[in-house]
Image: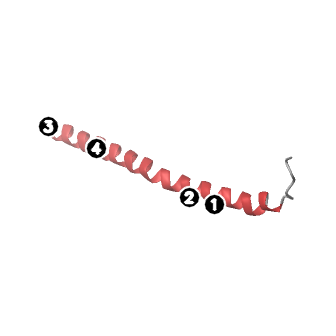
Amino acid sequence: MSKTACASERETVKAVAGATLSVAAAYPIVFSAMFVLQFGYYTLVWRRRPLRRMV
């Protein structure tokens, strides 16, 4: 195996590991962002609406 092939494989492994880490980090980031957005909507909009009887 030549040196360029080893370097190419290392770069591929680094790219795959970086992509996997990005996907793994994206889930908690998006989860936290949606939690904050939903909490903000509840506190600023939904909670202030008057309750109406449905029946």
Which amino acid type is marked by label 4?
A: Val
Q: Are marks 4 and 2 in contact (CB under 8 Å)?
A: no
Q: Are marks 2 and 1 in contact (CB under 8 Å)?
A: yes
| For marks 1 and 4 on the same chain, the one whose residue lies earlier in the sequence | 4
Q: Nearer the viewer, mark 3 or mark 4?
A: 4
Q: Which mark is residue 32?
A: 2
Which amino acid type is marked by label 2?
A: Ser
Marks 1 and 4 sit apart, C-alpha to C-alpha, by: 35 Å
Q: Which residue is mark 4?
A: 13
Q: Determine the residue positioned at 82% across, 62% down.
A: 48
Q: Which residue is mark 3?
A: 2
| For marks 3 and 4 on the same chain, the one whose residue lies earlier in the sequence | 3
- x, y percent for residue 13: 28, 43
Q: Nearer the viewer, mark 3 or mark 2?
A: 2
- x, y percent for residue 5: 20, 37
Q: Which residue is mark 1?
A: 36
Which amino acid type is marked by label 3?
A: Ser
Neighbours of disc 1 within 10 Å: few (<14), some (14-19), many (20+): few
Measured along the vertical axis of the image, is residue 28 above or below residue 3? below
Which amino acid type is marked by label 1?
A: Val
